[in-house]
Image (tube, helix red, strand yellow):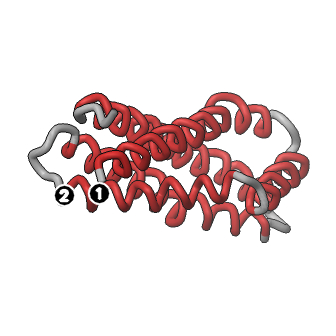
Amino acid sequence: MELSINLLLWFAAIGCGLIAGIYFAFSTFIMAALGRIDEGGGIAAMNSINATILGSLFMPLFFGTTLASVALVILGLAAWGQPGSTVMLAGGLIHVIGMFASTLVFNVPLNKELTRAGEGAADVWARYLKKWTFWNHVRTVASTVACAGFIAALLARPPVF
């Protein structure tokens, strides 16, 4: 059982780290670059990114780390008081709420609004850039903190081998 928990922690830590890196790129330069081009080009590029990501390897990673995080929340509660249980639980909650829930509640609806942008697209694009990027910052921080929490849990746990 301990080996399975450690493997789940490793998967979640690596997955959150990869996701955090992707979100970091969007937060630090991709959205700024898209904001520097005309709104028609920016909207077309972002809609293309959003359509492409749905069929990419990002999606299994996105859902896989979320499921692993939910499992680690449950395992953290079940192992309460044992070394690493607190940061395992915290990392899982932070990832599920800060990354997954904020994506569903904020970023996805903004993406859907952008796909429908027609007349008044300049207003939609300006609002989208600001709001989507803010919530992407939240996802970046949440994924990074969750990754650190999972690593801390691994370090706190007794070695399995």
134 over 1 or under it: above or below = above
142 over 73 or under it: above or below = above
Q: Residue at x 88, y 42 (%)?
A: 38
Q: Nearer the viewer, residue 11 or 16?
A: 11
Q: Which residue is under mark 1?
A: 73
Q: Residue furthest left?
A: 81
State the SS at label 1. Answer: helix
| Residue 68 sits in quarter | bottom left
Distance between the alpha carbons at the discs numbered 1 and 2: 6 Å
Q: Residue at x 46, y 62 (%)?
A: 67
Please tell me how crowded label 2 is: few (under 14), some (14-19), or many (20+) other residues with Cα within 10 Å: some
Is there CB contact under 8 Å for labels 1 and 2?
Answer: yes
Pick the quarter of the image with the C terminus.
top left
Count of numbered circles on the image: 2
Amino acid at dot 2: Leu
Amino acid at dot 1: Val
State the SS at label 2. Answer: helix
Find residue 95 and report its horizontal and vertical position in percent.
41, 50
- As drawn, is 96 to the left or to the right of 127? left
Q: Which residue is under mark 2?
A: 77
146 over 117 or under it: above or below = above
Pick the quarter of the image with the N terminus.
bottom left
Find residue 63 and report its horizontal and vertical position in percent.
56, 61
Q: Nearer the viewer, residue 5 or 122?
A: 5
- As drawn, is 112 to the left or to the right of 39? left
Q: Residue at x 40, y 55 (%)?
A: 69
Find residue 51 and report its horizontal and vertical position in percent.
80, 61
